[in-house]
């Protein structure tokens, strides 16, 4: 018992000494955060606009009588923009909660860095809440083809079934984000973070299933795996970058733990993405023969790039950080992680554009339904 207490004391002494020796000044830390956030935001917006252009979402066209793309209206841009903010903020909340569990602490009590992650999760959950509410309005506007300014908001709460049935999921998710924000602002233990983490994952999954999950059961479950793995990977790395980059003793513990999680997440994302793409594309030729296939290729390129980053991390930066070889290894991790997070957010933006792009599978199913209706009508005419 005495030996355990002594080892813990030595650990925290070494940690405090390392913190005093390597902690950056507050202005410089703030500039680093600002640079990373702005760079990531630019990458996300640029990727969203480019992927929407590739997917044909910036102009309206018809394929087999399916209206594809937008008309340049406020909803055309507001819907993907609010979805991107919702996805990034919810992923950030999940990553911050995961970081609380990966960072070292004493028993059930989190470290000071973990507590900062909790408070940031609470603030980011408020962004998630507002973005989901905005997405509700834009999605409703998109479904009924009416401008946001002409929506009858009173009917949304009194007659949801006839106005916008999916509104229940949006309203539930908005309330859940608000609950997570309030809870993260007051909890002080790892157990609290452990309880909030699955709640946050559930909220993200519910909203993700609003997209292509209607294509079938297989797509539904592959999408769940894809979204959960991506949120843990992207959010976890961003949380460590923003809150633990100046804490070498904590990075030495958290980064190797996260590396194992990231490897599992990468494998899950790749496998589920391949399965979903194969079902939605329907054939190899559709990869380069459809707009959907082009956007999928762009997302696959981002995943390959992230795989290269991850390989470099595991081979070079992670062993050096674990060994505590100095500030050079930590700075290398920060630079590499910042670039990786920017690519990750760009991949999320591409996924948002992909959810707005008509897949070959959807076009084929629409054509089959149209042919069946036409055949039924013809048979009725003949019988009549």
Image: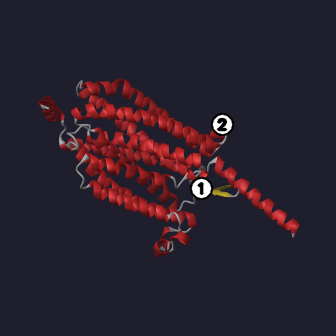
Its colouring scheme is secondary structure
What quarter of the picture does the N terminus occupy? top left
Quadrant occupied by the C terminus: bottom right
| Residue 302 in sight | no
* Residue 69 - label: 1
The mark nearer the N terminus, 2 or 1, is 1
Residue at 51% across / 36% down in the picture? 270
SS class, disc 1: loop
Q: Residue at x 49, y 43 (%)?
A: 226
- The location of residue 124, given as percent across then percent down, is 33, 53
As displayed, is residue 58 above or below residue 4? below
Residue 284 disc label: 2
Local crowd at mark 1 within 10 Å, few (<14), some, or many (≥20)?
A: many
Query: Taking 145 as reference, is 1 left or right?
Result: left
Toward which corner of the image does residue 336 lie, by quadrant? top left
Badge nearest the viewer, 2 or 1: 2
SS at badge 2: loop
- Nearest the viewer among 165 and 43 is 165
Image position of 227 (left or right of 372): left
């Amino acid at each position: 018992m005495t030996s355990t207490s002594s080892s813990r004391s030595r650990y925290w002494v070494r940690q405090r000494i390392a913190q005093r020796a390597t902690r950056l000044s507050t202005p410089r830390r703030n500039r680093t955060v600002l640079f990373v956030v702005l760079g990531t935001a630019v990458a996300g917006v640029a990727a969203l606009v480019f992927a929407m252009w590739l997917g044909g979402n910036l102009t309206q066209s018809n394929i087999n009588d399916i209206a594809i793309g937008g008309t340049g209206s406020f909803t055309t841009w507001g819907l993907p923009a609010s979805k991107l903010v919702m996805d990034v903020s919810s992923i950030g909340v999940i990553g911050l909660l995961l970081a609380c569990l990966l960072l070292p602490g004493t028993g059930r009590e989190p470290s000071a860095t973990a507590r900062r992650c909790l408070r940031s999760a609470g603030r980011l959950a408020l962004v998630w809440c507002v973005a989901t509410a905005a997405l509700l309005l834009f999605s409703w506007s998109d479904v009924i083809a009416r401008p946001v300014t002409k929506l009858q908001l009173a009917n949304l709460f009194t007659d949801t079934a006839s106005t916008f049935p999916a509104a229940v999921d949006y309203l539930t998710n908005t309330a859940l984000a608000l609950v997570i924000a309030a809870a993260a602002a007051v909890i002080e233990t790892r157990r609290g973070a452990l309880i909030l983490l699955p709640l946050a994952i559930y909220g993200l999954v519910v909203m993700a299933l609003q997209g292509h999950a209607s294509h079938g059961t297989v797509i539904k479950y592959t999408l769940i795996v894809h979204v959960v793995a991506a949120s843990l990977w992207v959010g976890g790395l961003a949380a460590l970058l923003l809150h633990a980059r100046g804490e070498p003793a904590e990075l030495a513990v958290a980064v190797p733990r996260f590396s194992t999680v990231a490897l599992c997440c990468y494998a899950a994302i790749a496998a589920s993405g391949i399965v979903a793409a194969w079902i939605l594309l329907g054939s190899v030729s559709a990869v380069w023969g459809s707009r959907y296939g082009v956007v999928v290729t762009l997302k696959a390129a981002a995943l390959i790039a992230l795989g290269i980053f991850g390989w470099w991390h595991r081979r070079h930066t992670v062993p050096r950080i674990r060994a505590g070889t100095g500030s050079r290894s930590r700075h290398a991790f920060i630079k590499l992680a910042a670039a990786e997070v920017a690519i990750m957010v760009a991949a999320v933006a591409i996924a948002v554009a992909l959810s707005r792009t008509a897949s070959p599978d959807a076009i084929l199913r629409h054509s089959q339904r149209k042919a069946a209706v036409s055949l039924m009508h013809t048979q009725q005419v003949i019988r009549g």
